[in-house]
Structures are given as structure tokens and as C-alpha cells.
Amino acid sequence: MIDVHTHILPLIDDGSESIKDSMAMIETEIANGVRDIFLTPHALRVNIKKYSLEHLLDAFNKFKTEVEAKYDVRLYLGQEIAYHHTLINALKNKQILSMNDSEYILLELPFDEEIEDFEELAFSCQVLGYKIIISHVERYSYLSSNDWEKLRSYGALFQVNSSSITGKSGKSIQKKTFKLFNKNYVEMVGSDIHVFRDNTMAEAFKIVEKRFGNQIANNVFKENAKKFFKIK
């Protein structure tokens, strides 16, 4: 499997405060059947300490070297980019990262209020050569089915969390997640793992396979990410 959304990289955001914790999370990924892992620390979040792109790349390269020497996994870099008024300028100036240097960015929407200019944002990203994947789309309580349809009409793709599939994030969120699957609105699944969260990728795969079939499970847990993010 490919985990497209994690907060494993140590000492960058709120995901891990030590190499030891990060290595333990790598081991839980392996135990869950994940062999390709995207490290997607938060970017442009006002409640997360700022870090330079140079610092991020240096931390990633060192961690990647250490992990891949010890474990049979492959690490890739991206960021979970929070919606912010500086986002387009940051993309334009190459201050934030797409997923594995692909054309796709992982975008986190506000949790408490809907943004009014998504069409403009999507168009501006398109002009710069980027496409949007909305992270854990099932977690935004203000989004209705009609809103999902509107977002997709602007070219947005959807990622959901494995814990939303298993019900560990609540039954109402699980219900919304299954509705997204029924509408064929899910492109990929990520663990969104932090040191304080359980990894539910294997359990989620089994649930999706049972409810929606093996082909859908393989697509959202592996094949789509390979196609979108330049993974061989």
C-alpha cells in the first residue's frame, strides 16, 4: 500500500517530537502493509511553528537515508498545505511543495468555515500547473453532497483518512466517508498518522475491499497514488 498523508517526519510539525517516535511510526506502517510513505508535514498553518524549505528538505533527506537503510520502505516528500491567503504566492515562488514534485498539491481546508473563493483558487493553481487534492474531505462538517460536487467540478480530487473508514473518527464521519465511496468521489486513502494516533491502514483496506470490491480498494490504497505522484 501507499500512505499518501502522514506526519511522521520528526521535529517539523505536530506529528513527531523525536526520531524514536518517527521510527516507531515507520514500523507501524510496515505492520499495516505500507511500503511507500509520503511525509506531508503541515505548511501555512498558523498554529504550527514555521520552518524554511531548506530545513525541511535537509530533515527529509537525512531521515530518508536513515529509514531506507534500515527498513524495506520508500519515502517521498510533500506537504499538507493549509488554505491561506499567501498560498498562491508561495506556490508561485516555490516556497511550498507538491506531492513528490508532481502536479498535485495536498490542500487542507479550514475546519470551521467554508472558503468563498475556491473556484478562483483552483483556477490560479491550474494556471501555475497544479491540481488540488483535498485532504480528509470527510472531516469538514460544513461540506454537503452538493458542495462535494461543486468542488469536483472545479477539478478537485479527494483524499479520506483510514480512521474515517474504520469508524475511529466517529460514526457520522464514517457514514459520510462511505457516501463519498458510493459516489466514486474517493481517489486515495491516507493514515494522517501522528505519534498520538493509531495506524488503521490495514483495517481500512479490508473494510473497503469488503464493501466496495478489490479493484476499488487497490485503486484508492495504491494505484491512483502511483499514477498521480510519479511512483514506479
Image (spheres, rainbow, N blue to C red):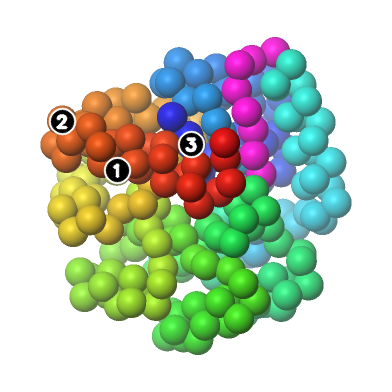
Give the number of the mark in front: 1 or 3. 3
> What residue is pinned by disc 2?
210
Q: Quadrant of residue 71?
A: top right
Check whether the beta carbons of the residues at disc 1 and disc 2 lie within 8 A of each other: no
Q: Could you say which is closer to the camera, residue 119 or residue 24? A: 119
Bounds of the magenta span?
70-79
Where disc 3 sits, the SS reads strand
Give the residue type that dot 2 points to: Lys
Q: Residues within 10 Å of mark 1 (few under 14, many from 20)?
A: many
Where disc 2 sits, the SS reads helix
Q: Which mark is residue 164?
A: 1
Q: Which mark is residue 3?
A: 3
Q: Which residue corresponds to the image point at 55% horizontal and 17% vertical from the top-left?
A: 27
Q: Residues within 10 Å of mark 2 (few under 14, many from 20)?
A: few
Give the CA separation, mark 3 to mark 2. Answer: 20 Å
Query: Where residue 207 sits in the image (x, y, percent)?
Result: 21, 31
Relative to residue 209, is residue 39 drawn left or right? right
Instruction: Give above or below for 16 relative to 158.
Output: above
Give the CA separation, mark 1 to mark 2. Answer: 16 Å
Residue positioned most to the top? 70
Does residue 76 belong to the magenta stretch? yes
Give the CA separation, mark 1 to mark 3. Answer: 15 Å
Relative to residue 172, is residue 197 drawn left or right? right
- Report if residue 142 is visible in the image: no
Give the residue type that dot 3 points to: Asp
Does residue 149 belong to the magenta stretch? no
Query: Where residue 191 sits in the image (x, y, percent)?
Result: 43, 37
